[in-house]
Image (cartoon, rainbow, N blue to C red):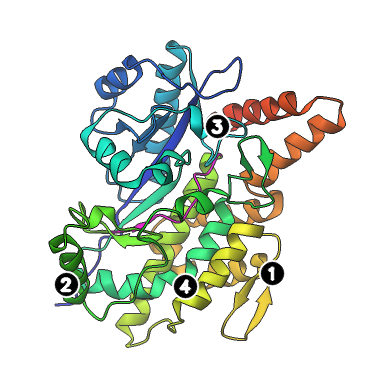
């Protein structure tokens, strides 16, 4: 009997807790925020490494539209609880001006161990991301798709960029988050593995050497989840706009289903070396959707808009099967109006042109992020 993946979906998002008046991070937010979140959203919201971060997780959903609805509920409820305690949330992968040196890490065993092991590298981790889990229940298929989907990771990153600022400076990068995250070990494009057993052997080698406790400390851009029978996409910046998040989740789901269809016909996506994919990863990190990615099939830089249109066409039957055509087609809106990074920079430069000083212009970016994080959550 032919195996049929569930292609279920779950979305994790990390938010920053801010002081809505000053726009600065809430360095020591009230613990009752997390207590109330657990009461109202049991097992769906938890603290992150830094006290100013909060993580939300949708339950397992059958479709992307269902996941979007759950994500909207999470954003609305976490925001309501934060506001009741004098805070607001923003969905952005870096804060426009707060400094990592002023932050405190959460006093929990896992985070204390990370703080001890990684030192300044992890103390700088004032970044947020979005992870998308897709249900691939078969171990061998999960590894096979891991090897193939890596090609598309830069395309996904380019559509999600939301971290153009770092400590009050315009970095010139659309996703500065990756520059920070890449200081950690075991990040970036994953290795290629011939089988699930080979993957396990590599994990066991690290565990037996006492380097990691388990595979949850493999922080690759995409990985087999340690906790769930899923492929977990991790390269994305957190999307400020909720419909952008749903669109990217739909894209990842559809690409995986397309690759599975190829497998059923004894075909597969051409394998490209990690060094080539890493070049596109850098271009997405630096330019987002603005300067194109390399189409290695023809060996030329092609506009991201053309590449995404090609992918939309390629996965059209998958979007129909997974009931996420609307979400997938929203990618065209991202391409036309820009990502969060574009909009943050526009807000900032407009404020400067109107005579605001730099601190006030940066505060206007936080104001935009507060509003945009909640835009559409009640629709």
Residue 151 circle label: 4
Q: CA distance from mark 2 to mark 3?
A: 40 Å
The answer to which image quadrant residue 212 occupies is: bottom left
Q: Which of the two labelled residues, at mark 3 and mark 1, occupies the earlier sequence position?
A: 3
Please tell me whether residue 72 is drawn above or below residue 295 in the rendered image.
above
Q: Which of the two labelled residues, at mark 1 and mark 2, occupies the earlier sequence position?
A: 2
Residue 119 in the figure: left or right of residue 230? right
Q: Which of the two labelled residues, at mark 1 and mark 4, occupies the earlier sequence position?
A: 4
Q: Tag 1, which secondary structure?
A: loop
Q: Position of residue 183 (x, y in %)?
A: 45, 54
Task: Report the mark closest to the observer, 2 or 3.
Answer: 3
Q: How many marks?
A: 4
Q: Which of the two labelled residues, at mark 3 and mark 4, occupies the earlier sequence position?
A: 3
Q: Position of residue 174 (x, y in %)?
A: 63, 51
Q: Tag 2, which secondary structure?
A: helix
Q: Which of the two labelled residues, at mark 2 and mark 3, occupies the earlier sequence position?
A: 3
Please tell me whether residue 213 is drawn above or below residue 355 in the rendered image.
below
Q: Tag 4, which secondary structure?
A: helix
* Residue marked by disc 3: 99
Residue 344 in the figure: left or right of residue 62? right
Residue 224 in the figure: left or right of residue 325? left
Q: Position of residue 327 (x, y in %)?
A: 51, 52
Task: Report the mark closest to the observer, 3 or 1.
Answer: 3
Q: Are marks 3 and 1 in contact (CB under 8 Å)?
A: no
Q: Tag 3, which secondary structure?
A: loop
* Residue marked by disc 2: 201
Residue at 25% from the left image edge and 60% from the top image edge:
6
């Amino acid at each position: 009997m032919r195996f049929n993946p569930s292609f279920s979906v779950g979305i994790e998002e990390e938010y920053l807790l801010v002081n809505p008046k000053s726009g600065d991070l809430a360095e020591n937010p009230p613990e009752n925020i997390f207590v109330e979140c657990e009461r109202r959203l049991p097992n769906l919201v938890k603290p992150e490494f830094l006290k100013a971060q909060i993580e939300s997780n949708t339950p397992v959903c059958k479709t992307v539209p269902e996941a979007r609805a759950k994500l909207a509920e999470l954003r609305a409820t976490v925001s309501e609880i934060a506001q009741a305690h004098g805070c607001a949330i923003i969905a952005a992968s870096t804060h426009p001006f707060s400094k990592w040196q002023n932050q405190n890490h959460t006093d929990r065993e896992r985070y204390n161990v990370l703080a001890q092991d990684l030192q300044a590298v992890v103390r700088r981790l004032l970044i947020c991301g979005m992870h998308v889990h897709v249900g691939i229940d078969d171990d061998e298929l999960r590894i096979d798709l891991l090897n193939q989907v890596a090609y598309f990771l830069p395309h996904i990153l380019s559509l999600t960029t939301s971290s153009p600022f770092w400590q009050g400076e315009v970095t010139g990068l659309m996703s500065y988050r990756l520059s920070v995250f890449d200081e950690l070990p075991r990040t970036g494009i994953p290795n290629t593995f011939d089988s699930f057993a080979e993957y396990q052997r590599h994990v066991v080698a690290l565990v037996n050497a006492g380097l990691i406790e388990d595979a949850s400390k493999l922080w690759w851009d995409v990985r087999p989840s340690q906790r769930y029978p899923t492929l977990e996409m991790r390269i994305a910046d957190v999307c400020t706009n909720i419909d952008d998040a749903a669109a990217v989740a739909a894209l990842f789901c559809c690409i995986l289903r397309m690759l599975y269809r190829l497998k059923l016909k004894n075909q597969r996506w051409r394998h490209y070396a990690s060094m080539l994919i890493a070049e596109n990863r850098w271009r997405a990190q630096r330019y987002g959707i603005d300067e194109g990615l390399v189409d290695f099939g023809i060996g030329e830089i092609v506009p991201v808009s053309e590449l995404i249109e090609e992918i939309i066409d390629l996965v059209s039957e998958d979007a129909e099967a997974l009931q996420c055509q609307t979400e997938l087609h929203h990618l065209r809106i991202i391409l036309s109006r820009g990502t969060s990074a574009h909009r943050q920079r526009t807000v900032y430069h407009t404020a400067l042109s109107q005579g605001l000083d730099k601190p006030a212009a940066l505060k206007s970016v936080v104001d935009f992020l507060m509003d945009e994080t909640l835009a559409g959550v009640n629709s």
